[in-house]
Image (spheres, rainbow, N blue to C red):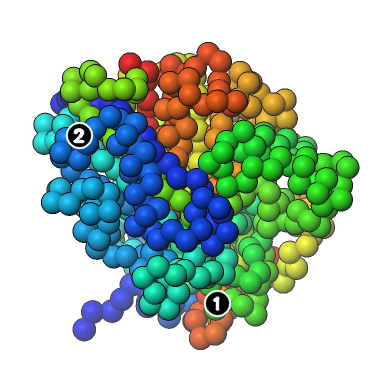
Amino acid sequence: MPESIIKRYYDGLGEGRLVARKCNKCGAYTFPPTTACEHCGSFDQEWTELSGRGSLLFVSHGIAPPPNPRFDEMAPYAYGHIILEEGVTVDAIVKDVEPTPENLQALFESAPVDVEADPVNVKGLNVLAFKIV
Amino acid sequence: MSGELRDRVSIIGVGCSRFGDLLATPELVGLSLQELAAIAAQEAMEDAGVDSAEIGAVYVGNAMAHSSQLPGTYSQVSKWLGMQFKAGVHFEAQCSTTNVGAAMAAMAIAAGVYDKVLVVGFESTLTKPKELSPYERERISSEQSWMWTDYAVNQAYSVPQGYDIFSVYNGLVAQGYCRKYGYSIEEFDHAMFELCRTRRLHGSMNPKAAVQETLEDEAKRLGYDDPYEFWTSKQNPFVAWPSRIRSLVTACDGASAMVLSRSEAARNTPNAPVELRGFGISQGDLPWYAKDPTLWPSDRIAFQEAYAMSGIQPEDVDYLHCHDCSHISGICAAEQSGYLPAGEGLRYAEQGRLRFDGDRPMSTHGGRHAFGHAWAASAGSDTYEAVKQMRGEAGKRQIHPAPHVSMIHTHGYAMISTVLVLERS
Ligand SMILES: [Zn+2]
């Protein structure tokens, strides 16, 4: 029985793992994983994991109420632009930052700051999130 | 040989409804979507001086089937456009729809399949059919409209994990711009204020714009003598810090249309044809940028392709529209195109140089904030404005001298970077 790549990614988050794919043709990572390499289009990839360690480059926030009702109780939340140590960029929720202008200004001035992945379960779905370390 | 149009193609007619609210805007209240689309199509056909018999195909664009509830859009709407029995298709490229339609039409014409093609786009972002009524519509909430709109965005990973457009398209890009070019957040905020003033000035001079009140008049109406005090007040909150709500899109209902023709077959049109010299289309999934939020690969590729196909250079461009659903992203795209020098966009905005009477005019119809944004119709509204400007028919907001070459960049959610190059024949 085939297993959905998407399901495998979210299942991985539930175990604290960042499931990715590495291209056998160009060597680049595709994260989150897709059927083809997002850099060269090759279907020849293998499974791998990313460390979850990275730098938070910028952090802003979304609107409340949010477009996606899954996040009704969380919004507004901080949402950041992160580069992982493998060189992969990712946009994700940043935990434990109340998104006030003062807090975001302070982070803008101190960035980049070290972060690590700390997935959170939101209404039954494992969601990628990061915390400042 | 690829990357060229083998025959010359011109836009010979353009049409556009007023943008606004099907439940409130006087010109739109009570209209069905079929009738809304017909307003734009009829204007474009009359502008082109052609009748239905001369049209080879009709391409009908609509992005959000949840609000239209008109799948099978091409077959449902064609009769209302006078296009019964014509070849065609329903297509969408989200907010690039109508201009991708122009590119598709140009390809079909240059290949010799059709002489003339009608492209139509329409959208309601504010309303949906009331129950199952064929003509009554009702309000949809902003978050409902965004949820439906976001169905066009990475549904595997981004939307389920807390993505919304405001952070990624506004706040993060703004911070990236300030960091890269050394602007303070205060300088950014003031430049966004000036840019909004420019957009709203343009909207106030355009009878088809959704928002025709200047920013200064709005401030006064809400009790502020100093418009910048209004700008920084709670009346203009941060939607994605440091971007405020008036640096964003005004979601609307509306329709636009254009008639494209083989240039050789367009010698006796009532209005001067505008040649479609070239186009570029590229798509980038999230994240739309790597380490630097000001540089979007899909934009770079679309501009490169459009320049290559049209054979023009950045210095040839007299008028640029960039997708300005987010004002800072529009500035980044303008810098990417070469129309504005890198890192200078905020200063140009601050100095009023992007106004219709400035040396680098942009978004003279009012842009997504003042003219408004009706997803599948908006790219056509940008083309409408460019054609009117090039013909010298833009009224109070006319650029002098009328632009010879125009470039129109749009972002189709999420993200289809599309660039058209137009040249006065
Ligand atoms: Zn590869």
| Mark 1, residue position | A69
Q: Residue furthest top?
A: B401
Do we see residue B5 in this rendering?
no
Judged left or right of residue A102, residue A99 is: left
Tell me if mark 2 has few (under 14), some (14-19) or many (20+) residues whose alpha carbon lies within 10 angstroms of its own: many
Task: Identify the mark at residue A2; answer none if there is no mark.
Answer: none
Is the residue B359 above or below the residue A88 in the image? above
The residue closer to the viewer here, B50 or B329, is B50
- Same chain for the residues at labels 1 and 2, yes or no? no
Q: Say which residue appears at 75% left-offset and 68% top-offset.
A: A98
Residue B263: percent from the left, percent from the top? Answer: 22, 22
Is the residue B129 above or below the residue B190 in the image? below
| Mark 2, residue position | B116
Residue type for callout 2: Lys
Chain at numbered mark 2? B
Residue B167: percent from the left, percent from the top? Answer: 61, 57
Element carrying mark 2: strand
Is the residue B404 above or below the residue A29 in the image? above
Residue B382: percent from the left, percent from the top? Answer: 46, 37
Q: Say which residue appears at 71% left-offset and 40% top-offset.
A: B214
In the figure, residue B362 lies in which quadrant?
top right
Number of marks in the rendered image: 2
Do we see residue A65 in this rendering?
yes
Give me the C-alpha separation between circle 1 and circle 2.
45 Å
Q: Say which residue appears at 87% left-offset and 41% top-offset.
A: B226
Element carrying mark 1: helix
Judged left or right of residue A102, residue A119 is: left
